[in-house]
Amino acid sequence: MLRDVRHMVREVTQAVAPIVAVIIIIQVFLMKTPLLTILLFLLGSAMVVIGIALFLLGVKIGLLPMGETIGSEMPKSGSVILIVVVAFLFGLLATIAEPDVRVLTSMVQTVSNGTIPQNPLILVIAVGVGFFVATAILRILYNVPIAWLFCAGYAAVLILSFFTPAEYLPIAFDAGGVTTGPVTVPFILALGIGVSSVLGGRSALKDGFGLIGLASIGPILGVMLLGVLG
């Protein structure tokens, strides 16, 4: 375990170090930032490295195996309804727990002076993700070409864009982006790989991926519908 922690810290440090170096150069030579501020920035950067490393380690030893296990066990129940409900709930709850979603909705509420409240927006985004995760799992079960779902989903986005109020359009597309965050992505991918791995004649590489792309359509449509109906 300790070796895994060291390995993860080293990987995260290599990823974060160039960003930290550029920011320090800008602070020192362009902004003339005080030394105390730079030291606080370095302290914060160290905490970020440790936090991300521990999070990624948790994903590796917890979320991914659990998601694959649940995904591989669901088809054995023989109940399509159960599979759809479980997939929807996982998509819904993972999105509610997603930090990126909370950041976006909080900023939207602030900028809109409360006219677009945070909690209903989170719920709309989460329901959209849950619906399309369930749809993606059904696609794997019934071997539906993923291109059909992408075409149908983005055709709906294109049509709705003509009726959605202008202030909701950018929020809708940002909502699709923030759902691809550190909580939602690992679990949904593991779920899809788990389902495809137990179905005979299926490729986990071909069928287990694409769920995130489909799931990101849900929030876009959800926020657009919120603007149209609101």
Image (cartoon, rainbow, N blue to C red):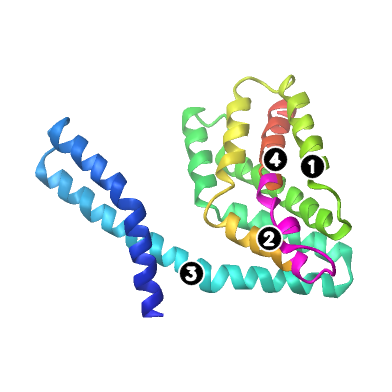
Residue at 61% over, 73% down: 65
Q: Position of residue 17 (x, y in %)?
A: 29, 51
**Type of residue at label 2?**
Phe
Reading the chain from its start, which is encountered first: label 3 or label 1?
Answer: 3
Q: Position of residue 190 (x, y in %)?
A: 65, 64
Cβ atoms under marks 4 and 3 closer than 8 Å: no
Q: Position of residue 166 (x, y in %)?
A: 63, 19
Q: Which residue is mark 1?
A: 147
Q: Which residue is mark 2?
A: 90
Residue at 78% over, 57% down: 137
Q: Which residue is mark 4?
A: 217
Magenta stretch in the rendered image:
195-213
**Type of residue at label 1?**
Ala
Is disc 4 placed on a helix, strand or loop? helix
Reading the chain from its start, which is encountered first: label 1 or label 2?
Answer: 2
Q: Quadrant of residue 25?
A: top left
**Type of residue at label 3?**
Gly
Q: Judge from the rendering whether residue 153 lies leftward or rightward of residue 90; answer left or right.
A: right
Reading the chain from its start, which is encountered first: label 1 or label 4?
Answer: 1
**Of labels 1 and 2, the one closer to you:** 1
Q: CA distance from mark 4 to mark 3?
A: 27 Å
Q: Which residue is mark 3?
A: 58
Q: CA distance from mark 1 to mark 2?
A: 24 Å
